[in-house]
Amino acid sequence: MNIEILLWLIPLPPLLAFFIIMLFSRGNKVFADVVSIGAMVGTWVLSLIVLFTALGIGGSELGKHPIESSIEWLPIGEMLSTGEAAPEPAEGTEEGREIPANAVTEEGFRMGVILDPLNTVLIFFVPLTATMIFIYASGYMGTGHYWTLVLEGEDHHDADQHDEDHDVEAHHDDHGHHTVVDDAGRTIAHTDATKWKARFMGIISLFAGGMLLLTMADNLLLLFMGWEIMGLCSYLLIGFWNDRIYPNEPGRITPPFAGIKAFMTTRAADVVMLIGIAWLYSVTGTLSYREILYNEEVLHALEAMAFPANPLLAPLGLSIGGAIALLLFTGTVGKSAQFPLHTWLPDAMEGPTPVSAMIHAATMVSAGIYLLLRFFPLISLGWGHGVEGFPLQMQIIAGVGAFTALFAATIAIAQNDIKKVLAYSTISQLGFMVAAVGIGAYIAAAFHLMTHAVFKALLFMGSGSVIHAVEHGAEHAEHHGHHLPIDFDPQDMRNMGGLLTRLPITAWTFIIGGAALSGFPFITAGFWSKDEILLDAWHEAPIVFWVLAIAAFLTAFYTARQIAMTFLGEPRTVAAEEAGPTGFRMEFPLIVLAVGAVLLGYIGVHPEMPVFGPIFSPDPEGSPFKLFVGKTLLESPELLALEAPSVITSIIVALGGLAVGLLVYGLRPLQSPDSTDPLKRLLGPVHTLLANKYYMDELYDAVFVRPAQAIAVFIFLVLDRGIIDNLIHSIARFTEWVGFRNKDFDTEIINGFGDRFARSVAQTGQQLKYSQTGRIQQYLVVVATGVILLFGVFLYTIFLR
Amino acid sequence: MEAFPFLTIITFAPVVGAIVLLLLPPESRMEDQARIDRVNQIVKILALVFTGISLVLSLIVYVYIYQQYGPDASVPTQEAIFFLEDGPIEWVPQIGITYHMGVDGISAPMLLLTGLASFCGVLISWNINRPREFFAWFMLLVAGVYGVFVALDMFLLFFFYELAIFPMYLLIAAWGWKVLREYAAMKLTLYILIGSVISIVGVIAMYFLMRDAGVTASFNIYDLIAARDAGVFDQVIVENIPFVGIDNVTFAQAWFPFIFLGFAVLAGIFPFHNWSPDGHVAAPTAVSMIHAGVLMKLGAYAALRVAVFLLPEGALVHLPWIIVLSLVNVVYGSLIALVQRDFKYVIGFSSVSHMGLVSMGIATMNVTGMTGAGLQMFSHGAMTALFFATVGMVYDRAHTRDIPSLGGFWQKMPTVAIAFVLAGFVSMGMPGLSGFVAEFPIFKGLFEASRDLTLVTSGQPATYYAIIAIIAVLAIPITAFYVLRVTYRVFFGEFEPARYHDPITDVTTIDKVAMLMLGSTLVLLGVFPFLMSDMVEGAMRPIAFLLGG
């Protein structure tokens, strides 16, 4: 089959699965499982074909001539670009402002797919992890329950039952339906966590479809579409249990709010990114990767255009290309949860565990890094070519990344929720990748993106398996008459301990994943990729190197802490005591990913590395991974020499962190859920600060949320209803007043004149009628009087004149 | 195609329908309930048939226009072309009034939108009380709306414009929300009438100017175009404005703001927007749909067709400051929507915000931005009609629109919830839905208009357009927030049956059909924007050309 058609087909099966499940499943869980997993496996098969084709073509050929296919989509502005090509230039800003005409397409906006070495990497790991997550989800979403409010007059059993006529798993019926009254006097009950499973499988299919769309896109706009589809799905999935409450934990964020928070944070960043996209489109007339990023002329023009005329921005020395890169980077900051927009990600743990794995490993957060890698030619404008130092945009990116890596790692050491630790660890690891892009370590960032995706998916699903086991343990314990506290949290590591013997497969795969995360030397993938980043930093930016090294130490430390608290020691609660293995569908993906977490590293071994180098990277030019992916760029990055201090530091921080963690938490495990964390004894108030995540949420609430609300209320009540409406009402009232005065004038003067005239005529008539008596004598008297008077007048005029 | 009077039939079919309905016996004359029901059933079916005729014909017209602008058609020119004209028929020749109808790429989508909104409006109002009178007035309103979009004679345009306003008043005042209906109906009518009167005066002034200049004086758009091209409207009418120091103000420059803003009142431009949220809220569901969905577009359409198209020289001077008003619309409307307690007011203010984007797109004065404005008119129309339909369905069952008193409606009416979320995502500009297809060109147009991309705030008037774009996108996250807030409060969470008097039931199949029609339009346009963008762009090009874009 034609390879271009395959590229178009890759995102299709999950998208179709979404529609099929949404339209036809009617709550049937088996149907949803089959359709979604079937679609995902289909995509995986397609992606494997594409992957092997790509490997067969080889990196250098694929880098020069990517496989492309596109169709015309939105014909906007095509004539305009040429029509407006020569606006009268403002004074003093002429130089370097012309965009080469070849960048302007005459055909309008084209949508298409592409296959080049960079997205081949994603085509490898996205369908793989997604398939594993889907299989896992079909098992995970089969059991469990959470607390919801019970309302008066509602039979809870009925409320649960209504959409699960086809449920075949049916092990929710024999437990869980008891109601309790919590401290606040509300009646609460367990509700079945699986009640909307079909919907869940549908939405994660859409999620995977969005990610694959983003992966295959050949232009920024299609990438943005996939990006936003994922934003939408993460909103729906994080808030999936939308009626969940936390009894006795009033301050805790509930799933729907966590969903809103995630969506809002990423959305706010996305609009900044959208500005960048619109700007880039206006400057170049295209959004296609090939036309912008592989066109020397366009890149030079973007680099040459500075902010010369703007007095505020000129001193920054930022080119337009750099400014656009920073706007796009803001999108990454939101999506990949970098400081200061990281706060949504830990709260996103409110979603079901497969979602966490989906978000943190395979998809959403990877998308941010992928964007940076994709736009690396734009980001690195003005770097290299004999110029000393980094351009401003790269400094900012490296700074944000390195700071986030350390910042999140410090928070992670003080968390007790097993998923929150992993969430902060994800933020920290993404910080590593962002910092790597910022210092120009393109290959290392791509490599770490891939290995991290695999081992972090493993860790999240492992933690889900643990939570699941503890939940089961809690149910068993309740059946046996034990009473757990109402706010018993199966995700809290203080409630665990000693799980190594109870769920061995989960435990050992989790330990492998943890070792990879800490960068355990030589046998884990995490070591090789993190080592690459540190090596680049050693060469390019020593400050970044040391910051990342400290972060790596903390990573190893909290990983050891997590493993010790969860798996080692003795069970601290009956729930942990009663926990047992979680079944094939949940454990099989763990095994597959654990294998990946070990083996994947060997494709990126530095050729100068003793023992391993000659075996895995026979070519002295670089590792197979580098030779393949590096060809994506116009100029393949050169190989940096292996430095012993860097490698040794990397080994020391990994082993040292693990050792310290195991010493503190492994040798003397916590005795009960309530015992004080040894770190708290050591750090005191600093620990409180870390446990509360530096109070970032509270800060944002005070700085952004409340003022925005206040401004909106002010605008509505004062401006809109107060000033504008009152103005209108005053005009109306004035008009009315004028009307009344008019009416007065009308009734009194105009109408009054007529009325009075008429009335006086009538009155005159009234008076006069008395003269009309009808008697002849009286008339005669009047006539005689008149005659006499007239005669008198006559005489007077004749004689007295 | 030209031989058959499509446009006349589209416009007058609802009028005929209204007359037919009024010929049926009123409810008060009938004693027996069964007969009343039977007559009402006939009334509803007749209303559906007559709005359906217009819908089908406007779809045919749309397809025809699509072919005219499509890829196989000749290269788009820089001259305005109107299709399917009936030819000018002398109506009042003494003062140059003609009967003349035609469509182009801007009005064809509007016709389709009117057809959709009115047809769905009839479906949504299936259980309205006193259907005979309601639908009669409703169809008269629809006829007025159609008329404005097809009129090529300015007098005819005003005739239909006023025809649309009058039934609106009755519909709101008689069938509206009891608390607010008289106030809102009066507010709306006065605002729009005053606005249109100002515009009428402007157009009459144009007529007299043409007569004095010795060119063919009439209200027909071709004569007006000829006069425009002959420079009639560029005569200096004010030599010098004292104290301000502006010399040689031409007719176009002096009259443009009045004519534009006179129409833009109906498009809800700040600070003349206040009639619209009150009007939306007070109106019955179907009228809200027409009102926000189509009627507000009349204002934008007429402002574009009359003010910008005929007085481009004035537009060049004034649009750069009018864009600031539209920016206020966009941000201000969304902020207000954020803090409403009344479900319907949220949507009402969101319309204010989104209509700001339309005038913003027009004010970019280039093809890209104006195409975006045209698409936004359609997209917002269908989206907001869907919004109001869903709000109406919730309100009909819960008898309250107070957001904190609602909750959990997803469980009771899943289709409505999905429709609301869909409209919500359109309104926040999600890629793949029509909102994005419309908003992205507007933002891009703003950047294009800002010729100096280095963000300098001085110099040419258009240099601050990029900054306008940057401020305007603030509205996108705010929009996302109020949509999600409402979704969460109304549709998510626990459903509490005790709060409502009646048991809450799911919507009927008829309602679902209406929602499906509107919703699928939004998705279709989002995935295949070229179905509309070609024609809108082709028709906007001559206008943008006049503005130097």
Image (cartoon, rainbow, N blue to C red):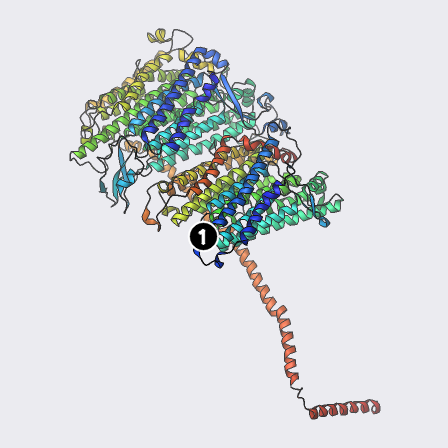
Residue linked to disc 1: B37
Q: Nearest the camera: B50 or A265?
A: B50
In the image, A213 versus A466, the foreground residue is A213
Give the image location of residue B117, x and y in percent: 51, 42
Asked if A33 appears above or below B285 in the picture, the reply is above
Image quadrant in which you'd find residue A459: top left
Look at label 1 and name its amino acid.
Answer: Asp
| Residue B391 image point, x, y percent | 43, 45
Residue A496: in sight, yes or no?
yes
Question: In front here: B432 or A318?
Answer: B432
Residue A440 appears in the picture as rendered: no
Residue at image point 60% right, 22% down: A101
Q: Subunit of mark 1? A: B
> SS at mark 1?
helix
| Quarter where residue B491 is shown | top left
- How many other residues sit within 10 Å of disc 1, few (<14), some (14-19) or many (≥20)? few
Please, is residue A314 above or below residue B480 in the view?
above
Question: In percent of the image, x 71 and y 49: which residue is there?
Answer: B95
The quadrant in which the N terminus of chain B is found is top right
Q: How many marks?
A: 1
**Residue B47 on image: x %, y %:** 52, 47
Quarter occupied by residue A598: top left
Q: Position of residue A43 (x, y in %)?
A: 40, 21
